[in-house]
Amino acid sequence: MGGGTSSYREIEETDCILLWGSNARETHPIFFHHLLAGLKRGAKLYAIDPRRTASAQWADLWAGLDVGTDIALSNTMAREIIHAGLVNREFIEHATSGFDTYAAMVEPWTLERGEAETRVPAAVIREMAHAYATAKRAIICWTLGITEHHTAVHNVMALINLSLLTGHVGRWGSGLNPLRGQNNVQGGGDMGALPDRLPGFQHVENEAVRAKFDRFYGVAVPPKKGWHLSAMFDAMERGDLRALYVIGENPLQSEADQHRATRLLESLDLLVVQDIFLTETAQRADIVFPAAAGAFESEGTVTNSERRVQRVRKTLNPPGEAREDLAIICDLAGRMGHPWAADAEAIWNEVRQLSPAHAGMSYARLEQLSGLQWPCYDEQHPGEVFLHGRLWERPVRGPRAPFSLVKHALPLDHLDDQFPLRLTTGRRLAEYNTGVQTGSYASPTRRGETIDVSPEDAARMGLVEGQSVRVTSRRGAVVAPVHIDPSLRPGLTFMTFHFPDDVATNLLTSDATDPLVGTAEFKATAIRIETGDGTPASRH
Amino acid sequence: MSHDDIAFHLPPAPRDIPAAPAGPAPTMVPLTIDGRAVEVPSGATLIDACAALDITVPTLCYLKTLTPVNACRMCVVEVEGARVLAPACSRQVEPGMVVKTRSPRVNLSRKMVLELLGSSVDLSTAPGLAEMMAEYDARPERFHQSLTSAPSVSSAALASESASSASSAALGESASSAALGDSASSASSVALGDSASSASSVALASSASSASLAAGSVSVASVAQPVKVDNDLYVRDYGKCILCYKCVEACGTDAQHTFAIAVAGRGFNAHISTELDVPLPDSACVYCGNCIAVCPTGALMATPEFELRKAGEWRPETQAVTDTICPYCGVGCTLTVHVQDQQIVKVTSPFDNDVTRGNLCVKGRFGFEYVNRT
């Protein structure tokens, strides 16, 4: 199963933190409290981010790399660690495979080449590499700055490589931690809301696994994996996917390349949307099921970024005809001839029988212990605070951890004379995604959508704060006010997608995706900025 | 990340269940509290040791998740052999300590703390304060008497050991007159100087008008002042502030590290302030509300509660309180949701929760309006 290897408490007791492609100060504020406790205890923080974010301002060093050069940076750090003799030989020999090939692959990545490709000064790369490798304990955290690229999977592997090189995994205070962006991203994946997984992250094309589920439910589970989100849109394009059932998502506004998403959603024979709001997507639906709000109007569990399964409880009655997701799905199943009981605890107990990693998590224990971290094999098991401890057993049991060969590849939406500026996207502290939940509370810090530009670019283009400009990419254009942001380097611009009704940022973004998992490259769009009278402002 | 590995199985469980490395076993420290023996780890405080014996020590400025600042002096206890009373919240245990938590001296001190606070601060929304007042027979109204008939007593009398060793009936009287003379003289001069110099945020108590001063009647100064309402999420009613520093600590190095507020001013003019006293929207505040969560008097209050109280419709006894998980990012913060009449009226988080330690961000604490009916 995939999940953060460490607990939040470990970042308080680690010695070195690489915060990579994550502005946790704004996007995971309470996790950042744990991180700050670590800094107070003396840990070093290195922030690797194209923007000098609110998080980077807490860092000992900020590595302001060019968007999409994460693998180049990681490979350069790896070569430096190898050449400086700072690898953990003992760990590599006993617990990993593929080191020699990996070392050969990173060999061309000298500090000079790394600097040229990433634009992070060689001395900074060197210091980060040495600090990470020589720390007694070290943790790498990342967020969508690593995964919203066409090289999403390889970016993650590049970070894993660094941990294998130095033995910074599988021990207290050393680990690899993706910070999940939504309250149940982890749980959704764990429960099989992926095209190729059954609950417990068990692969649907594995016959033994499937047989277990077939026996348990008395029906044959479809033997082939399905499509991920981006592949679904491709299938709509081909006409292979004609009916779509969307639960709790607003793809019309959250997907990259909104023109295309709108066209494809409108072309469906049947669009069913189950949501707590009549979103832009729901407004185009043939059938809308009004749903209860997950966190406040339903019973169930969610799983957080430290693999902790926690109880969600009903605090309010849903309004009008809105019903819990579970009740709606079970009613649908009933109409299809499968009378399921819409009882959250009973369904959770099914999960416990089918997923060994969740077997020990009874509702009573989740209640009593404020949640449990998987894997939790039986009702006596306390849950594992960190993963992969087995890699430190001699001899190691189970498979060795493989080094991965990952190649640097720039974003697909390339910069040129027509589109010379890099646009990257992200969240702000007080807002969330397309704003359907956060739009209704009166945040005093809300200032709406802006196109954030560096002071240098603003001066060069003659832009002033608040000036309305036209932002154009290869896919579309929007009009937005300028905000001059000194945290941006020349050539880099930033927008959120929190206010899509005012400024539809995703009209601009690229639908280039990682071929392995379909993650869209939201972090790297090529744009140009023009002032109101149509004259190009972003000349070289 | 073995993406297409259909043979994927969970790797074998480690032989030992992963855990934090065990530190060295703590030295146990024996001591006696209220005649009962107890052993606690070295480094523990007297309040920890009291907790081990189920002895409740009253506190205002203390919170397990914050660094003790010893501001309120409610938690003082008597340590045998010590000249002065010790704050239990921060005093570390020592071998052989003999501690009394409810001696007459302790009781008098706590009573005085409550009376001094009660005479100058609006404690009407401070949870548990009325019970504490009753328990220690605190009568803040004694400080509102006219001064004309009050004997002139040196302030030294207040602190004299003879006062505290007197019988409790006589003690109350002597302490009363002493404190009256003392606080009236100093407080009135502070208040006068203040109101004369500027429209400061520290106001005179309403009864201490110039007319009553002219008549020779002076009341103690209070911190009464208008409520600060400068944003839609929470209000600051510093007429209820006891300067416990908790909000400053929660905003600062104990949790949030935003440093939007600090204590400004000296003596009676000390007050919680943003930088240059600017309104919150012009300050560094990020509206996490972690200051509200730790405020012991209701001086900091989320707007829904403030509005409901103003309308006389705040009914905590009718509220359903349920724990759930925040709907936003993947950290998984526990939200304790307070619901009145099918409306969420307040969100907090448990201080003993390992994920949050009682802290939330602006979305978790305030971002619930989308499920409230308008």
Image (cartoon, coloured by chain):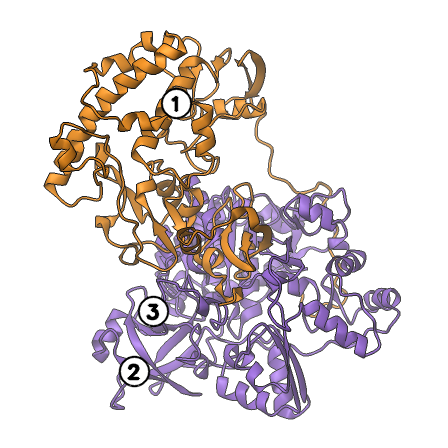
- Element on which disc 3 rests: loop
Q: CA distance from mark 1 to mark 3?
A: 49 Å
Q: Residue at x 37, y 63 (%)?
A: A64
Q: Which mark is residue B313?
A: none
Residue B76 pos. (x, y %) = 41, 21
Of residues A363 and B110, which is closer to you in this image? Answer: B110
Colour of chain B, in one word, is orange
Q: Residue at x 46, y 38 (%)?
A: B127
Q: Chain of mark 1?
A: B
Mark 2–mark 3 distance (CA, rounded to whole Å): 17 Å
The disc labelled 1 sits on which kind of residue?
Lys
Chain assignment, label 2: A
Q: Where is residue B277 drawn, in percent x and y?
A: 23, 49
Q: Residues within 10 Å of mark 3 (few under 14, many from 20)?
A: few
Colour used to depict chain A in the structure image: purple
Front-lying residue, A254 or A455: A254
Disc 2 marks which residue?
A469
Number of the label disc, if any, that sits on residue A447? 3
Based on the displayed image, in which of its 4 quarters is residue A160 positioned? bottom right
C-alpha gap between disc 2 and disc 1? 65 Å
Can the viewer see residue A168 in this picture?
no
Question: Foreground residue, B27 or B29?
Answer: B29
Q: Is residue A247 visible?
A: yes
Mark 2 or 3: the one toward you = 3
Going by the numbered disc 3, the residue's amino acid type is Arg
**Placement of the C terminus of chain A among the 4 image quadrants:** bottom left
